[in-house]
Structures are given as C-alpha cells and as structure tokens.
Image: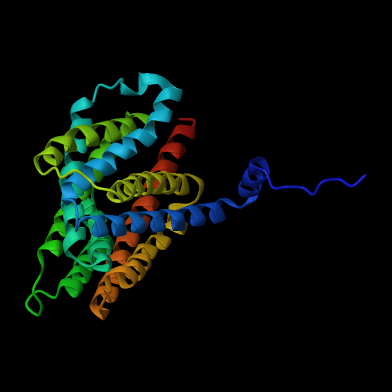
Amino acid sequence: MVSAPDEPSGRSRGAAWRSLSPTTRGVTLMAVSTLGFSAMHTAVRYLSAELPPIQIAFFRNFFGLIIFLPLVWQNGLGFLHTKRFPLHLLRGGLNVVAMFAFFTALSLAPLARVNALAFTAPLFAAILSVVILRERFRARRWAAIILGFIGTLVILRPGFAVVDLGSWLVLFAAGVWGFTMIVIRVLGRTESSLTTTGYMNLLLSVLSIGPALYVWQTPQGAAWFWLVVIGISGTASQLALAEALKVAETTVIMPFDFLKIIWAAMFGFLLFAEIPDLFTWVGAAIIFTSSFYIAWRERVVLGRARLARAGKAERPY
C-alpha cells in the first residue's frame, strides 16, 4: 500500500514558525511590518489623486475597526471599562490630527522623504517627556536629539532649497505623534493593551467621520479595493509590529525599521518615478540613528531602575 505524500498543514506551518528563534521571528515580523506600512503609504499616495486624503484616513480607520471586531467578539465589551476616558479621547484626537496631516503629506511629497522625516517622532517624544513627564536626560541623549534635528536640516536644506508644504506637514504630524507617545505611556500605567487599542480603533473612526463627510467624494470602482488594502495593510502592520516587539528585544529589531525608507524608495521609483537624492538618504540615516540611540538609552535606564527596585526589595533590612 502506497501512502499519500505528506502535505503541509496549517498546524505544521505553525509549529515550524514557533520553532524559529525569537530573534528570527521578531526580525521577520518587523520586516513584514515595514513592508505593510510602505504599501499602505504607497496606496494612499496613489489614491489621493482621486479622493481627499482626509477621506482616505477615515476609511483607513473604518476598515481597521472592522478587523478589530473579532477581538471584541472574543473578549466582550469589558475592554471599554476605564476611568481614563479623557486621556483615551485625547489620544484619539491627536492621532486623527496626525493622520490627516501625514496622509496629506503623502499626497504632496516624495514617499522616501515623508518616511525619512517621520523618523523624527521619537525626537519630539523625547523632548516632550522632559517637559511633561519631568524626565532627566544626560548629555548623550541631548546630543542624540540635536543630531537628529541636524539630520532633518540635511533633508530639508532650508535656505538652499524651498521647503515644501508636504515636508512641513510630516514634521507637524511627527510632533503630534510624539505627544501621542507620551499619552500612551501614561495610559500604559493603568490600562490594558486591549483597552488602549480598542479605544484607539473606535475613537479614530468616530472622530474622523465628520471631516471625511465634509470633503466626501463617493469612491468609484477600483478605489474601493485600494481603500480596503489601506485598511488591512495598516492594521496588519500594526499587529506585526506589536508582535515583533513582544517576541524579540527592541534593540535587535528596531534597526530593521529603516527598511521603510528602502521600500518607500523602491515603490516611489517604480510607481511615481521618484528618485531620492543623496541628502534624503544621509539625513534619514542620521535621524534614524539618533532616534534608535534614544530608544536604546531609555531601555537601558529603565532596566537599571528595575534592577535597583528589585535589589531594594530583596534587602533583609
């Protein structure tokens, strides 16, 4: 009797995935996340020739909410219980403003430049953490922040080139995202990830529908396909990023976030005949390096603080 050849099953593929090292899984998920975000940005750029960016942002949030609904079905509405609704509302409002600005920038500026300037968000978050959370930075982190903004000047070259509206909008969006990061950190002290994610998806859809209706143009034909692609790729990329950060060390996987620039440059060249100049590549590398260093130093400081607290707790006196 001849047995049928083994066929790969979902269970065997899942086992093979789990057999990989956490670092390999984290790096893979991070690469998938960057590709997904770049695909979403490209689709936004393409569709903005037909629909207003604000309306595209609404559909991004709407389809993202639909994808989140199975989790609601599985966990119930208990995640809505919170005593910090004003902070959730603030985060939602900030995210909507940043998304509107960023999607508009995608319709105006080259993809690679938009992604390069978006790396400044952690720089703004670092400065705001000093102002709002009263954190203390030493000289090395301040030097990294200054270096990051020098990288921004390398890309924009004010005084030597005209700074376009799209670039200004990216920097504005990055600044608002930096503020949002502070709100997320405060919420993370008391709220579960399901609660913060659930409120984000719900409030983004609710808060973006009014502005979308104001500029509404009914999508036609293939536009619906691209709107679904934007919603799915954006949400799937966020989930992949969250899982990557969960299974692997941040300092290991975050350097692969620079792939966003490479994907953006590739899509921009193939679809829109955009060729990033040398200043964009050099400035992006400077901004990314400084942002990564700030994140790494923050992780080191937090790790030392936890060890210090644990040491005090174990003392017999």
The image shows residue 283 at horizontal and vertical percentages of 25, 72
State how many labels appear.
0
Q: Nearer the viewer, residue 83 or 60?
A: 60
Q: Nearer the viewer, residue 96 or 67?
A: 67
Could you say where residue 108 lies in the image, as x and y percent from the top left? Answer: 16, 63
Task: Check the image and tell me how it is coloured.
Answer: rainbow
Asked whether residue 175 is in view, the answer is: no
Quick check: can you spot residue 243? yes
Kindly give the residue lying farthest to the right in the view shown: 1
Q: Residue at x 10, y 63 (%)?
A: 165
Q: Who is closer to the viewer here, 232 or 186?
A: 232
The N terminus lies in quadrant: top right
Instruction: Where is residue 248? Give x, y as percent.
Output: 50, 50
Please identify the quadrant where the C terminus is shown.
top left
Camera-side residue: 18 or 142? 18
Q: Quadrant of residue 211?
A: top left
Answer with the quarter of the image where residue 41 lies: bottom left
- Left or right, residue 146 beside residue 230: left
Is residue 22 found left or right of 125 in the rendered image?
Answer: right
In the picture provided, is 18 more to the left or to the right than 136? right
| Residue farthest along the front direction in this orientation | 221
75 shown above or below 219: above
Q: Residue 42's spot in the image, x, y percent?
A: 30, 59
Residue at horizontal 38 percent and vertical 29 percent from the top: 69
